[in-house]
Image (spheres, rainbow, N blue to C red):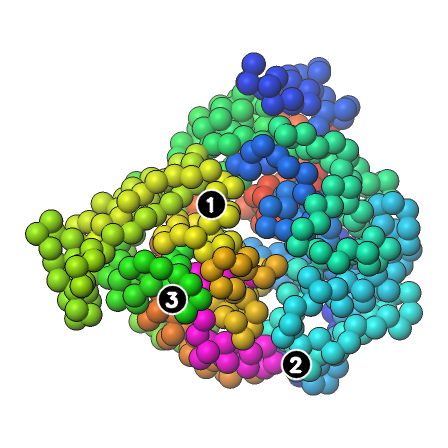
């Protein structure tokens, strides 16, 4: 939508011994007397594969616990990434651009409080936007000023239409009286967080952490779920077993046969493919990457060697969507695809094309069938997270397909922490991993966060962590892409933006710092016997997985116990 002049938006208000070892709250299955959803029963959520749990509720930390992002800390507004719809006010009530898009005037809701009872005012919002973690170098912020207790004016050096979600939907608002003394935000564990969201931390152990209702939450009287327990399980199968036994109520995970967990009469599921699954490649020699994958010809050949249709059927049992190498989400974002030839990645392998690419780049096939150059074979290591069965199966298939094209890949699994450390520090060659899909119907967020280089502060040299809030683990650093990203930030003209996106797309489709695989099968399983208010196909008011940042916090506020 082209916005001319002033824009103001009024926003809508918005088992057995294993279980005992995990320390579950209320060990009975859903609906039994000792697990009454109306009583002390906690809604039980899979915390993910990060085990043992370490208390870290810092929203800027790469190892932050899921419950911090939405249930505890909130942005100003909630954007529903499953639809092209108006945002919903959380802390914020409305916002308005000035004539040239360089200033945003935000009105927040009156009489808000932090979870410790201190007033939440526009001064906290201004502080949050000025805070270093929310305001990296190159962000373009000139000033953030509170003009009264409920009004904040954000002023930027250029128009900010394209970054609307980043500013208003993913900037976490912080209590100034706590964070003004936090100078080393990257290493602050924040074990007793003070937030604006519906929940506060009750207890954290190595096996689980529990959040309880925030009595100072703006809608505390309407909160149906007053206790949430996040349970650490380090693999899909154990989480699936707990779900089938009625010991988990909500999880986002891959289950190839959903009937295995829906037979208990409590669990239903929904599939909402949104997020790209890709091969991360540490691509950039200049920023310290090493290995054959740093050669664009090897990445192009591997891209041609992959049989995506087989991966879709065998690893993801047909639940995924087709991916575009432009990273526009289809069909939602199809208007942003500049060249129809780049609309969808090839679904079948083409070993002949892969061979031609390598031979044109000076590679020759050795006696073992593997291509080599200057005596060095094209041999790569590929990791995926142990227990992520769909990704592990995809990695094995990729290794088989690559070998048929003369590329040797050694696939192995690692623990979640090793995976996290590897991608953050750049100590890898290939990873089967996911991207965070865009939260609005526009691929800009992926272009800036995942493909932006040093000019837009989205990546770092190998050995240094990627900047907070950015995700360019490939270390891709292309000045043409960076310049187009910076120009796209300030345009409100759809044709101009599409032209800029076309420039970005041409570069990333050629360079392939991330090799596209599929749009991930995002399955969510939830307990409809004990709780109502979940997102459904008929009312997809939020992205439904339990791990979704911000969205999960909003979903929790919509749930009510049955009866």
Task: Indicate whether 550 appears above or below 356.
Answer: above
Mark closest to the chain's N terminus, 3 or 2: 2
Q: Quadrant of residue 341?
A: bottom left
Image point 32% across, 58% down: which residue?
Answer: 291
Residue 443 appears in the rendering: no
Q: Is residue 209 magenta?
A: no
**Direction from residue 67 to residue 39 in the image, left or right:** right
Mark closest to the chain's N terminus, 1 or 2: 2
Q: Quadrant of residue 394?
A: top left
Image point 75% across, 64% down: which residue?
Answer: 131
Q: Quadrant of residue 322?
A: bottom left
Please name the residue that numbered disc 3 is placed on: 285
Task: Indicate whether 112 appears above or below 46.
Answer: below
- Few, some or many residues within 10 Å of mark 3 (<14, 14–19, 20+): some
Residue 340 position within the rendered picture, expressed as x and y whole percent measured from the top left: 34, 72
Please name the residue that numbered disc 2 is placed on: 159
Of all residues, the one furthest to the left in this rendering is 367
- Few, some or many residues within 10 Å of mark 2 (<14, 14–19, 20+): many
State the quadrant of the N terminus. Answer: bottom right
Residue 459 position within the rendered picture, expressed as x and y whole percent measured from the top left: 52, 65
Q: CA distance from mark 3 to mark 1?
A: 21 Å
């Amino acid at each position: 939508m082209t916005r001319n002049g002033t824009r103001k938006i009024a926003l809508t208000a918005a088992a057995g011994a294993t279980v005992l070892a995990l320390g579950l709250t209320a060990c009975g299955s859903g609906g039994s007397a000792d697990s009454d959803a109306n009583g002390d029963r906690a809604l039980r959520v899979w915390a993910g594969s990060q085990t043992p749990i370490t208390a870290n509720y810092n929203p800027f930390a790469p190892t932050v616990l899921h419950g911090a992002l939405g249930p505890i800390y909130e942005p100003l507004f909630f954007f529903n990434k499953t639809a092209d719809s108006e945002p919903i006010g959380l802390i914020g009530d409305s916002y308005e651009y000035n004539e040239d898009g360089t200033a945003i005037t935000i009105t927040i809701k009156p009489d808000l409080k932090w979870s410790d009872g201190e007033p939440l005012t526009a001064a906290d919002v201004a502080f949050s936007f000025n805070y270093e973690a929310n305001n990296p170098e190159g962000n373009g912020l000139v000033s953030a000023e509170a003009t009264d207790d409920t009004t904040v004016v954000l002023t930027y050096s250029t128009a900010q239409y394209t970054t609307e979600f980043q500013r208003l939907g993913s900037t976490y608002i912080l209590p100034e009286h706590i964070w003004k003394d936090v100078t080393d935000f990257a290493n602050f564990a924040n074990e007793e967080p003070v937030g604006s969201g519906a929940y506060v931390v009750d207890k954290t152990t190595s096996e689980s952490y529990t959040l309880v209702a925030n009595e100072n939450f703006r809608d505390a009287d309407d909160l149906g779920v007053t206790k949430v327990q996040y349970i650490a399980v380090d693999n899909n199968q154990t989480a699936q077993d707990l779900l089938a036994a009625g010991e988990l109520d909500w999880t986002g995970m891959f289950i190839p046969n959903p009937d295995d967990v829906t037979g208990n009469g409590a669990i239903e599921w929904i599939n909402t493919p949104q997020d790209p699954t890709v091969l991360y490649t540490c691509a950039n020699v200049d920023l310290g990457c090493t290995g054959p994958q740093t050669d664009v010809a090897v990445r192009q050949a591997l891209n041609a060697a992959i049989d995506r249709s087989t991966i879709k059927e065998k690893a993801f049992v047909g639940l995924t969507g087709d991916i575009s190498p432009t990273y526009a989400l289809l069909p939602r974002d199809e208007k942003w695809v500049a060249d129809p030839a780049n609309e969808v990645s090839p679904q079948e392998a083409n070993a002949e094309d892969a061979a031609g690419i390598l031979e044109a780049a000076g590679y020759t096939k050795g006696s073992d069938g593997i291509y080599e150059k200057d005596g060095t074979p094209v041999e790569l290591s590929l990791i995926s997270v142990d227990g992520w069965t769909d990704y592990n199966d995809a990695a094995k298939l990729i290794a088989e397909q690559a070998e048929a094209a003369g590329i040797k890949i050694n696939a192995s699994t690692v623990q979640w922490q090793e995976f996290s450390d590897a991608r953050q520090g750049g100590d890898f060659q290939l990873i089967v991993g996911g991207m965070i899909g865009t939260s609005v119907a526009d691929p800009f967020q992926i272009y800036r966060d995942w493909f932006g280089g040093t000019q837009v502060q989205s990546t770092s040299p190998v050995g240094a962590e990627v900047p907070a809030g950015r995700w360019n683990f490939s270390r891709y650093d292309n000045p043409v892409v960076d310049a187009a990203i910076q120009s796209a930030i300030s345009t409100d003209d759809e044709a101009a933006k599409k032209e800029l996106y076309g420039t970005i797309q041409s570069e990333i489709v050629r360079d392939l710092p991330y090799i596209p695989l599929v749009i991930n099968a995002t399955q969510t399983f939830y307990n409809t016997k004990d709780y109502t208010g979940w997102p459904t196909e008929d009312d997809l008011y939020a992205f439904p997985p339990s791990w979704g940042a911000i969205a999960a916090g909003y979903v929790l506020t919509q749930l009510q116990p049955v009866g």
